[in-house]
Image: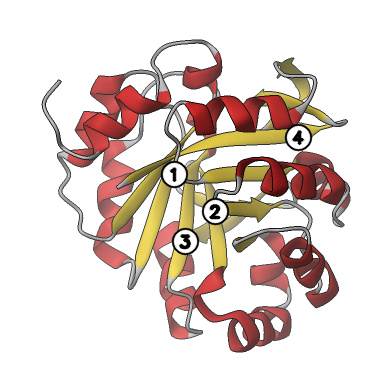
Amino acid sequence: MILLPAVDILDGQVVRLATGSFDQPTHYDADPVDAARRFKAGGARALHVVDLDGARTGAPVNLEQIRRIAEAVELPVQVGGGLRSLESVEQAFAAGAARVILGTAAYRDVDLLDEALARFGEKVVVSVDARNGKLAAQGWTEELEVPVEEVIGALAARGVRRLVYSSIERDGMLAGPDLDAARRVAEVVRGSFIYSGGISSLDDLEALRQLRAVNLAGVIVGKALYEGRFEVGEAQHVLDGRSS
């Protein structure tokens, strides 16, 4: 497993949201490149970058910031937020994304999903954002009455092999991961997935590692890193299964 530090961009700055709410973002770095460079210096192997403005409006807003990050750190960067057309997907790749994350569009525009998969294959990741076990969409502002397991099965049938699973009610709350949900997701995913939501300590990372889910490929961490709960290198050490 690898650690993916989160760089979430809103109004050009790095923020963290609590439970997916845009109402009271916590601000950190004024320049996202500063955060990206700090994570690389700490030993990050990849970054998770989200254009929150794009997620809210439905079209990319922070492509220039993504370009700056990709050029500055020369790490694989997976990018999501507002990618709801093939053009926007292409723009994200042109800005330096190694992988793109489709959220709302993956469920509401199956033609887009099919075409993106046909053209870019496993460089396309689908985000399964869950609240109360149900799919959330539209920049996390809308909850759909569809069980997550059903969603994952449908995506697999269309050829999706890479997922990000986010527990929104835990996101930014430092309340610990939803281990039961991660276990259930691991049982139904055909391919690999990355877990996100609630990580607060190295023990949380160890608990995810102890699930021993061979298809759990990584963990996204945001607030715990920004709040200094642990360092990137320490976290990767745990995920590598090395004793401290």
Q: What residue type is labelled 4?
A: Ile
Question: Which residue is depicted at the point 78% across and 66% down?
Answer: 94
Spatial distance from mark 2 to mark 3, Cα to Cα?
16 Å
Q: Which of marks 1 and 4 is nearer the N terminus?
A: 4
4 vs 2, front mark: 2
Q: Is residue 175 left or right of residue 207?
A: right
Q: Which of marks 1 and 3 is in front?
A: 1
The secondary structure type at the circle numbered 3 is strand
Mark 4 vs mark 3: give the one in front.
4
Looking at the image, can residue 167 be seen? yes
Label 3 CA crowd tier, 10 Å (few <14, some 14–19, many 20+) = many
The residue drawn where x is 59% and y is 54% is 78
Name the residue that disc number 2 marks: 76
**Numbered tag placed on residue 222 in the rendering:** none
Q: How far apart are marks 1 and 2 (CA)?
A: 7 Å
Q: Which label number is shown at residue 163?
A: 3
Q: Which residue is drawn at 59% across and 51% down?
A: 77
Q: How dense is the environment of label 1, judged by Cα within 10 Å: few (below 14), some, or many (20 and up)?
A: some
In the picture shown, does residue 66 fall above or below 107? above
Q: Distance between the residues labelled 1 and 3?
A: 18 Å
| Protein image colouring | secondary structure
Circle 4 residue: 9
**As shown in the figure, which amino acid type bears the numbered disc 2?**
Pro
